[in-house]
């Protein structure tokens, strides 16, 4: 079957909260093509349990939310971006309510009709809107229904982007402009040309680069890798957030235990039942995630145990079942009754704080290319993301990008001739085992050497190995037809390389980056790590 050339006003790559929000905010005016690597809802948003941070309580304030975010970010948050995001939080919560999302309300007579707000690590007040303990599911499914019902939005599921198409790649002079992308239809194994006046990465993060992660299988850093190959700057990739509490069970894959449990009084305990977080931070279980994850990692290594425990069994059983129905049922499925016994937990890779550099409009270094959500580096999170600021960032920057795109919509249409994908010099692979072996090796290497605690020796070892893996994967990519697994592996090794190089360059410990050889924070290094393709090549 001949390759197709498909045209739209806006091509959105990714179907989580950021991509769906942007599509809905643009679709009344422009024709949208939205690409989803799997089925539409199968992204990180669906699994977000905690909620969305926004000031609502009388005793809270915008300045307090700003201060908490800056403190969690360990000196690297951009204050302008933090204020911009916090100030636009309330209107975006209201937009979600208008879309039909039912946030949990208080049931007490004294607060009838008011929303129930939780408190999570790093927050000084209760300000987290939530839909019980399945906020992401409520957001994803509600927005998905509206997207699928909109006549101006075409959704292509089971499609994965191969690479961007830009004027520089086509050898055209002048400023680099994005013209579209090559997209693989996973059903037909055909690569088509998707032309668009505006292209938006909403591809999520890259935590699948680690062996143990709370993220779904799709979180392979595709947008970051494609933007890097196209010439965009990438920042702060050394700051990978490890969620402190994922369910530890041989049959439980990637199941997160929300931080809201700790916000409601759950305690971390060692196998002997004793608490330990008070020894690490005065905020104990409500310290920021980097502190809690490192404390758990240290105790597990000190004791040689496989996990620690999170205990909320001292709370009334009805309270637990009412506030955490998803976690209660999922743990019960594995034989754990959280109303009576503690939950075995371990840290796991959870969130990518770095990414594609953008401005307040979501614009990247390439004209007409935007990035929003976890794939972007806006400056909001700094060296450590505060809980429940991630979905907020998706909403606020989808709104900002939509306004900027609408302002630019009268730009002239694309006239450049874009060649079809060329498969004339490749064949079908006869050694798929190479892909699977390298996929496994990348993720194990990153977990062992570039994880929660790092050292110069570990980082240097990982750099040597990733350099070899890149050569092997590039050679394989050049000789065989592309598949979903090969494209994800190609992107994963790029992301791994960016993380390692960023970690090596930061000769201090700050936020989520902890190096045993530079255990202290250096005030002179209070700056972002920015990698540029031009300097990298040198």
Image: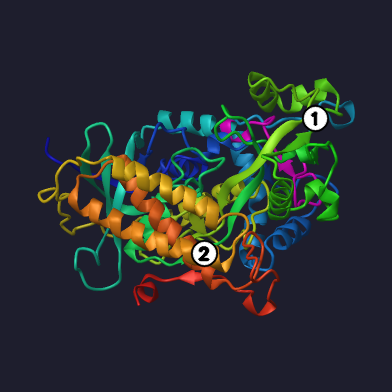
| Location of residue 312 in the rendering, given as x and y in whole percent from the top left corner | 81, 31
| Mark number displayed over residue 459 | 2
Q: Nearer the viewer, residue 389 or 116?
A: 389
Q: Which residues are magenta?
A: 116-137
**Image vertical order of residue 421 relative to residue 464, above or below:** above
Residue at 27% from the left image edge and 40% from the top image edge: 432
Residue with the mark numbered 1:
106
Q: Which residue is situated farthest in the right direction here?
A: 110
| Location of residue 111 in the rendering, given as x and y in whole percent from the top left corner | 85, 32
Q: Nearer the viewer, residue 190 or 418?
A: 190
Q: Quadrant of the N terminus?
A: top left
In contact (CB < 8 Å): disc 2 and disc 1 = no
Residue at 81% from the left image edge and 20% from the top image edge: 318
Horizontal placement of 44 versus 192: left or right? right
Horizontal placement of 9 versus 107: left or right? left
Query: Could you tell me what secondary structure mostly forms the magenta stretch?
Result: loop
Horizontal placement of 84 versus 533: left or right? right
Mark 2 or mark 1: whose residue is earlier in sequence: 1
Q: Nearer the viewer, residue 302 or 250?
A: 302
| Location of residue 80 in the rendering, given as x and y in whole percent from the top left corner | 63, 66
Residue at 54% from the left image edge and 43% from the top image edge: 212
Task: Check residue 321 for magenta coloring.
Answer: no
Task: Check residue 126 for magenta coloring.
Answer: yes
**Pointer 1: residues within 10 angstroms few (<14), some, or many (20+)?**
some
Look at discs 2 and 1 and give the one toward the viewer: 2
**Image vertical order of residue 503 relative to residue 181, above or below:** below
Instruction: Report whether residue 116 is seen.
Output: no
Q: Quadrant of residue 419?
A: bottom left
Q: Quadrant of the C terminus?
A: bottom left
């Amino acid at each position: 079957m001949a390759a197709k050339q498909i045209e739209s006003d806006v091509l959105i790559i990714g179907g989580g909260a950021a991509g769906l929000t942007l599509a809905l905010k643009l679709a009344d005016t422009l024709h949208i093509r939205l690409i989803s690597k799997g089925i539409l809802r199968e992204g990180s948003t669906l699994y977000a349990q905690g909620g969305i941070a926004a000031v609502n309580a009388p005793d809270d304030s915008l300045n307090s939310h700003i201060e908490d975010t800056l403190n969690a970010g360990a000196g690297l948050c951009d204050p302008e971006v933090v204020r911009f995001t916090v100030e636009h939080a309330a209107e975006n919560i209201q937009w979600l309510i208008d879309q039909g999302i039912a946030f949990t309300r208080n049931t007490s007579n004294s607060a009838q009709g008011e929303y129930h707000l939780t408190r999570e690590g790093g927050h000084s007040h209760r300000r987290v809107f939530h839909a019980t303990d399945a906020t992401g599911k409520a957001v994803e499914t509600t927005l998905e229904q509206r997207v699928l019902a909109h006549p101006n939005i075409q959704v292509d599921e089971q499609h994965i982007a191969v690479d961007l198409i830009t004027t520089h790649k086509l050898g055209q002079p002048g400023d680099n402009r994005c013209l579209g992308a090559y997209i693989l239809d996973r059903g037909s194994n055909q690569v088509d040309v998707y032309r668009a006046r505006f292209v938006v990465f909403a591809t999520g993060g890259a935590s699948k680069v680690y062996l143990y992660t709370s993220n779904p299988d799709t979180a392979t850093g595709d947008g970051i890798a494609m933007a890097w190959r196209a010439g965009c700057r990438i920042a702060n990739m050394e700051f990978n957030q490890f969620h402190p509490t994922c369910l530890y069970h041989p049959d439980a894959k990637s199941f997160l235990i929300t931080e809201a449990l700790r916000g409601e009084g759950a305690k971390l305990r060692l196998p002997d039942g004793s608490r330990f977080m008070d020894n690490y931070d005065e905020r104990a279980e409500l310290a920021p995630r980097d502190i809690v994850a490192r404390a758990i990692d240290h105790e597990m290594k000190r004791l040689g145990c496989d996990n620690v425990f999170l205990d909320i069994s001292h709370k009334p059983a009805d309270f637990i079942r009412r506030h955490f129905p998803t976690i209660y049922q999922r743990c019960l499925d594995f034989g754990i009754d959280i109303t009576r016994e503690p939950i075995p937990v371990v840290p796991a890779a959870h969130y990518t704080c770095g990414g594609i550099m953008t401005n307040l409009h979501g614009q990247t270094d390439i004209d007409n290319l935007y990035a929003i959500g976890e794939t972007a580096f806006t400056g909001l999170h700094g060296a450590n993301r505060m809980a429940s600021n991630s979905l907020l960032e998706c909403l606020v920057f989808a709104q900002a990008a939509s306004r900027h795109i609408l302002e630019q919509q009268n730009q002239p249409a694309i006239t450049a001739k874009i060649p079809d994908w060329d498969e004339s010099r490749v064949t079908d692979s006869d050694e798929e085992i190479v892909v699977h072996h390298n996929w496994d090796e990348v993720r194990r290497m990153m977990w062992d050497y570039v994880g929660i605690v790092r050292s110069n020796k570990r980082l240097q070892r990982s750099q040597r190995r990733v350099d070899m893996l890149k050569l092997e994967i590039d050679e394989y990519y050049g000789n065989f037809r592309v598949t979903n697994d090969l494209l994800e592996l190609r992107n994963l090794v790029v992301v791994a390389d960016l993380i390692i190089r960023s970690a090596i360059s930061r000769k201090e410990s700050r936020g989520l980056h902890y190096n045993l050889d530079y255990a202290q924070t250096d005030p002179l290094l209070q700056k972002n790590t920015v990698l540029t393709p031009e300097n990298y090549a040198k």
